[in-house]
Amino acid sequence: MTGHIFLIGFMGAGKSTVAHLLAEMLELPEIDLDARIVARAGRSIPELFAQEGEDAFRDLETQELAELSDAPSHVVACGGGVVIRSENRAALKRMGVVVYLRVTAGEALARIGDAETRPLLAGGGGALAATALLSARENLYRSVADITVDTVGRDPQAIADQVAAELGSTR
Ligand code: S3P
């Protein structure tokens, strides 16, 4: 098998939207890692963070990612923090091609709108929190990326088209 196509990047980078378009174009099934975590936990992400804490959420994230190792090829939209743990970074590299969708903190916040859906940006400190988190993670995203695509000011279909074209020369 050729492995999965993982979409990584900051919150608001468009991972889920682009994953959906890409899956249609490539005729592959898609997986949204956050949706799997929510289904398994029976709770929303804000509830999980509030009731169990971030570590518990990260454990579920690592578990869901690891369980993809025996699955046939999927387009996988990952949560923005999937790269924090080194074991997840190794899993991504091992299991497929990693596509990094780049976005700026400002555009990410504008796209997200209601930051209360993202516990790490909730509570009013959105702009500062996003800038700090993004700069802390930028190197991690880069370190696992096989393909990097800039998303600022671009619509999802144009991004998906570019990813598909670049995958054509990588896979
Ligand atoms: C997170 C990103 C979210 C979600 C959780 C934590 C992060 O996913 O997994 O709120 O740490 O960046 P999206 O990137 O899909 O918003």
Image: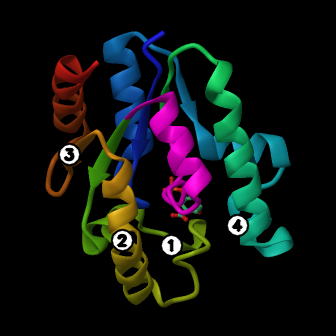
| Residue 99 visible to an observer of this rendering | yes
Using the rendered view, name the quadrant where residue 133 is placed. Answer: bottom left
| Residue 44 visible to an observer of this rendering | no
Ligand 1: does it lie within 8 Å of the C-beta at label 3? no
Ligand 1: does it lie within 8 Å of the C-beta at label 2? no
Residue 53 shown in magenta = no
Distance CA(mark 4)–CA(mark 2): 17 Å
Query: What x and y, as percent, mark residue 108?
Result: 33, 65
Badge 2 crowding class, 10 Å Cα cut-off, few under 14, some 14 to 19, many 20 or more, is: many
What label sits on residue 109 in the rendered view?
Answer: 2
Pointer 3 residue = 149
Q: Quadrant of ligand 1?
A: bottom right
Q: Amino acid at mark 1?
A: Ala
Pointer 1 residue = 115
Distance CA(mark 2)–CA(mark 3): 18 Å
Secondary structure at badge 2 equals helix
Asked if the residue under mark 2 is in contact with the one under mark 4, i.e. CB atoms within 8 Å, the reply is no
Q: Which residues are magenta?
A: 77-97
Depth check, mark 2 against mark 3: the one in front is 3
Pointer 4 residue = 46
132 shown above or below 81:
below
Ligand 1: does it lie within 8 Å of the C-beta at label 4? yes
Q: Amino acid at mark 2?
A: Leu
Circle nearer the N terminus (2, 3): 2
Asked if the residue under mark 2 is in contact with the one under mark 1, i.e. CB atoms within 8 Å, the reply is yes
Query: What x and y, as percent, mark residue 171?
Result: 29, 18
Badge 4 crowding class, 10 Å Cα cut-off, few under 14, some 14 to 19, many 20 or more, is: some
Circle nearer the N terminus (3, 4): 4
